[in-house]
Amino acid sequence: MHTKASILVVDDEPDLLENIVLALDAEGYQVHSAPDGLQALAKLESEDIDLILADIAMPNMNGYQLYQKVRENPEWLFVPFIFLTARGLNTDIDYGRELGVDDYIIKPVRVAELFSAVKGRLRRARELEETLMHQATSRAEPPEYINIGNLHIDLNQHKVWLNNEEIKLSAKEFLLLACLAENPGSVLSPQELVKTTHNLTANSSEATTLLGPLLHSLRRKLGFDIGDTGFIENVRSVGYRLLLPNY
């Protein structure tokens, strides 16, 4: 049996909701449920939730709106979020990835796929928490290296490796990645990042415009497809943050 991780399942189809709840409960998880995004937010306020599984098309508050509300709350920034949806269109999946959602499970749900996604995302969340705790206790002196999951950065030589393969970055791309990596999991505003990459003081709109091409090229060099934010997450209307690159 698993440790009692707490999972919130959100779906307006009662039969499907019950089946998923029963399957996760049988695996040893603590399971909470809600029929829409509004009631899910109430559950998040009252319960300690470790992972969210949510449908997209729901009344009152859909899955996209729920995801945005969750990521606006600093207390829920590290809670893994998986879309559970009948929508298999690439446009829907691409939009979710642009938002920064952790994963997709397409209905009809295969139990093996469900368990695999849940276990993987819970493991990554634990690893990120451990990384943050380790870096918080080792900041007495400026670091020469940053190691986060499979990402390794040499701050002195301006070199980057991902999965043991060196990635060639421009000076600004390196500064952007290093700035995010020095604050893993923390949301940095466009203004903060542009101050580092361009040595400029800019408003949010100007900073976002300057960062756009830089983020695009950085993600491509790190091996992510167009529309896939990878481990550099967009936090809508707030900024950007680095998640644990472990894949």
Image: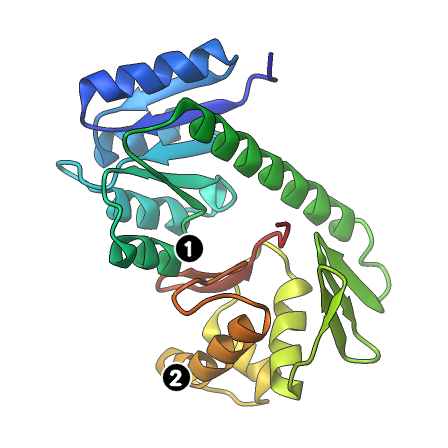
Q: What type is the residue that disc 1 sits on?
A: Gly
Q: Position of residue 32 (x, y in %)?
A: 37, 19
Of the pair 45 and 7, the residue shown nearer to us: 7
Separation of residues labelled 2 and 1 (CA atoms): 19 Å
Q: Nearer the viewer, mark 2 or mark 1?
A: 1
What is the crowding at mark 1: few (fewer than 14 residues within 10 Å), some, or many (at least 20)? Answer: many
Mark with earlier residue (2, 1): 1
Count every numbered label the image shows and give the total: 2
Q: Which quarter of the figure is the N terminus placed in? A: top right
Of the pair 6 and 96, the residue shown nearer to us: 96
Q: Which residue corresponds to the image point at 35% horizontal and 81% vertical from the top-left?
A: 205
Q: Which residue corresponds to the image point at 53% horizontal and 38% vertical from the top-left?
A: 121
Picture quadrant where residue 165 is located: bottom right
What is the crowding at mark 2: few (fewer than 14 residues within 10 Å), some, or many (at least 20)? Answer: few
Residue of label 2: 209
Q: Position of residue 64 (x, y in %)?
A: 27, 48
Q: Position of residue 57 (x, y in %)?
A: 18, 40
Label 2–label 1 contact, CB within 8 A: no
Q: Considering the numbered disc 1 on the image, is that residue within a helix, a strand or a loop?
A: loop
Disc number for residue 8: none
Residue of label 1: 100
* Residue 48 in view: no
